[in-house]
């Protein structure tokens, strides 16, 4: 195998090399674009820009190479991708500290297939959410009241809060302050408050939204910079998965 073929991508933790697929070139991780509308006003030079407050999906593609058994490996890879519904985790060895959430949209967009003597190359394209999530933000951090979490990125992170016990948890960052309250309970399972999905459940997936009270009806976030997290001593454990991300 050529020394140039050292990189690969992973789908939900399964390496593309499982199907004999290597990345033959860097490919493209598309930059996110803001969702904006341009409005033309008669008699006024230039357009007004109206932001919809979000970022659009972007395309990621890889130029791939299968050095042997092209047809069987390619067919198996294609069948696996088509079996996936919705978004899945996409990683590669070029960026080992981050991942994206990707999907196969409108069928499977594999193009530019070149196949000679059971060796072949092709390009695979994915439709991805705009965020590049950091692997450093996907583990729970067990906290002591008053601890700080430092968001070194430019975008608000939406954490998953894992608790045992009950009481109020407060997030403070400069002028930002937000709190949640978990009602008194005798749960033996962890309670998870997911600030992205806006949902509260136990680790056995039992819904617990009725035990959750939100300050001003909003879920907490981790803005850029250091956020101080304080909580009542009626909690026996508080952990946070911060979910750091950038664009």
Image (cartoon, rainbow, N blue to C red):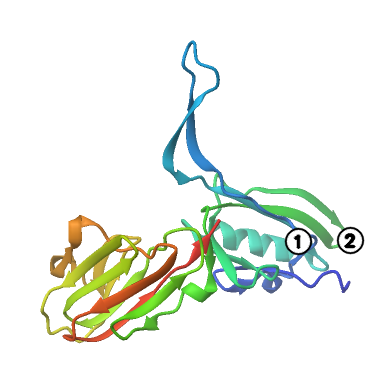
Q: Element type at marker 1?
A: helix
Confirm whether residue 214 shows in the render.
Answer: yes
Mark 1: give few (<14), some (14-19) or many (20+) Cα within 10 Å: some
Tell me the residue at 40%/62% (across/down).
223
Residue situated in front as seen by the camera: 241 or 87: 241
Query: Quick one: quadrant of the C terminus?
Result: bottom right
Residue 182 pos. (x, y %) = 17, 73
Splitting the image into 4 quarters, where does residue 171 fall?
bottom left
Kindly state the secondary structure of the residue where label 2 is placed: loop
Taking 128 as reference, is 116 left or right?
Answer: right
Could you say which disc has been placed on residue 239 in the image?
A: none
Please give left or right for residue 103 compared with residue 53 in the image.
right
Q: Nearer the viewer, residue 177 or 93?
A: 177
Q: Nearer the viewer, residue 223 or 79?
A: 223
Left or right: where does residue 206 sit relative to residue 45? left
Asked whether the viewer can see residue 203, the reply is: no
- Going from the N terminus, do you reach mark 1 or mark 2 first? 1
Q: Which residue of the protein is positioned furthest toward the front in this rendering?
A: 174
Residue 14 image offset from top left, x and y in percent: 60, 73
| Separation (CA) of disc 1 from disc 2 | 10 Å
Q: Residues within 10 Å of mark 2 (few under 14, many from 20)?
A: few
Q: Position of residue 57 (x, y in %)?
A: 53, 47
Picture quadrant where residue 124 is located: bottom right
Give the residue at mark 1: 71
Task: Tell me the residue at 41%/39% (across/down).
Answer: 52
């Amino acid at each position: 195998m050529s020394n140039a073929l050292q990189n690969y991508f992973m789908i939900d933790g399964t390496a593309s090399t499982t199907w004999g697929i290597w990345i033959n070139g860097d490919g493209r991780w598309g930059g996110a674009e803001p969702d904006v509308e341009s409005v033309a006003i008669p008699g006024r030079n230039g357009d007004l820009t109206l932001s919809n407050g979000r970022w659009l999906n972007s395309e990621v593609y890889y130029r791939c190479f299968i050095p042997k058994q092209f047809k069987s490996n390619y067919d198996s890879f294609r069948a696996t991708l088509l079996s996936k519904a919705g978004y899945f985790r996409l990683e590669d060895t070029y960026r080992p500290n981050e991942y994206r959430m990707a999907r196969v949209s409108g069928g499977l967009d594999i193009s530019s297939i070149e196949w000679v003597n059971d060796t072949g190359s092709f390009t695979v394209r994915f439709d991805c959410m705009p965020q590049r999530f950091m692997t450093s933000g996907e583990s729970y951090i067990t906290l002591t009241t008053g601890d700080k979490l430092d968001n070194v990125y430019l975008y608000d992170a939406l954490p998953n809060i894992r608790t045992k016990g009950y009481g109020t948890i407060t997030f403070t960052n400069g002028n930002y302050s937000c709190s949640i309250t978990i009602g008194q309970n005798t749960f033996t399972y962890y309670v998870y408050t997911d600030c992205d999905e806006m949902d509260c459940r136990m680790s056995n997936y039992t819904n617990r939204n009725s035990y959750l009270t939100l300050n001003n009806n909003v879920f907490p976030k981790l803005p850029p910079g250091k956020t101080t997290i304080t909580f009542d001593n009626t909690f026996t454990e508080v952990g946070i998965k911060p979910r750091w991300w950038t664009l």
